[in-house]
Image (spheres, rainbow, N blue to C red):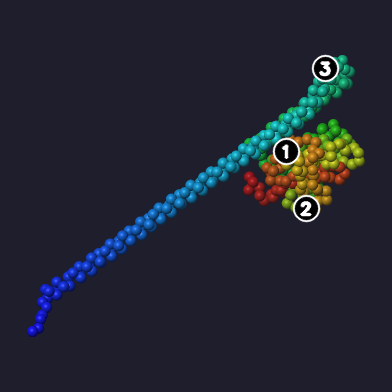
Amino acid sequence: MVLRVRPPARAALIRPWGESAMEFMDIGILWVCIGGALVLLMQAQALHLARVNRRLAEREEILQQKNAALDAANAKLREVGLIKSRLLANASRELRSPLAGILRAAETLTRYPSSDPDTVYRLGDTVAWEAGRLDRLIGTILELVEIESKAAVFNEGIVEPEALLKQAVARVDPIAKRHAVRIETITEGEVPALWGDEKRLTRALDVLLHNAVNYAPKGATVTARVTANGPEVVFTVEEARTGSGARAGGTAGAADRASSAWNGQDEAGWAAGGDDGGDATETLGAGDQLGVGLGLDLCRQIVERHRGRIWAERASGRGSRFNLALSAFDHSDVAGHA
């Protein structure tokens, strides 16, 4: 006898396995979906963290920039404070000299009212001279404050170096005659024109000439020279000291004074810089300074505003040589400067 399995019975045997497979497939799909969702969530979280880190980095950069700006502002304030302190110290020390001369003359006139006319005239002349010195010092202080505060206006134009030097010499010549010092002016060859503020540059040369006259002994000659040196025009003011007629105060008093005034240092000394191969240039100490030099500080400020350079050297004997170099003006650039 042969048994036959009917189709319904076969389907009944297969259905449980099919349903289990479908259930496993559904669970697999569910896990895939959950895994995909987790991956998407992690990616979103990573993107969010990246954005947060980027914002933090940007804010940190902004904070660093603000801190740098604050540090720069603080440094500028400290610099301004040092400038003010130096200016006050220099002014108080330099104003004391003409005031002392005026007081001495006034005391003499008060103590000896019946002095002879010549004495009265001499003392009156001293008062007038020292008052003039006082007026010039106050003018120098005002100029220095104006330039250092960046409020000064420079009226630039074409300047002829030879005429500039002659103007400065003419201004200082009365003082030189009072000191019994002669000023010799020399123009070496053809000197090109300059571009700058004629009034300010004359003032700078005036300071150098005045300083040289003050340090030169009676009967000495101060040489004021202008020459072309490559792309530059160089002004040189030299006061030569020879023999025992030099004034006391160091072997290069004027140059040492310049080094101290231009570098704001009294103890470290200063290496004067000049043309390569200069025979008289050497390291100048500031220990024997005879003054603080408001005028020399003003001179440096004017030269720097003209993008020039200035330096001091020990000259032959016991004198000093001041050099002021400015770029020569190219006439083809007139339109560019206008």
| Residue lying at 74% horizontally and 49% vertically, measured from the top left | 232
Tally of marks: 3
In the figure, residue 211 lies in which quadrant?
top right
Spot occupied by residue 281 in the image (x, y as percentages of width and height): 81, 48
In-image side of 298 versus 335 (left or right): right
Callout 2 crowding tier (Cα within 10 Å): few <14, some 14–19, many ≥20: few
* In the depicted structure, whether residue 226 falls above or below residue 219: below
Residue, far top: 114
In the figure, residue 37 lies in which quadrant?
bottom left
Spot occupied by residue 202 in the image (x, y as percentages of width and height): 74, 39
Give the distance between the C-alpha atoms of the residues marked 2 and 3, in whole angstroms. Answer: 58 Å
Which amino acid does the dot numbered 1 rest on? Answer: Asp
Callout 3 crowding tier (Cα within 10 Å): few <14, some 14–19, many ≥20: few
| Residue lying at 11% horizontally and 73% vertically, measured from the top left | 8
Q: Which residue position holds label 3?
A: 110
* In the depicted structure, whether residue 48 falls above or below residue 122: below
Earlier-in-chain disc, 1 versus 3 = 3
Which amino acid does the dot numbered 3 rest on? Answer: Thr
Q: Which residue position holds label 1?
A: 297
Give the distance between the C-alpha atoms of the residues marked 1 and 3, in whole angstroms. Answer: 37 Å
Earlier-in-chain disc, 2 versus 3 = 3
Depth check: 255 or 235 in front?
Answer: 255
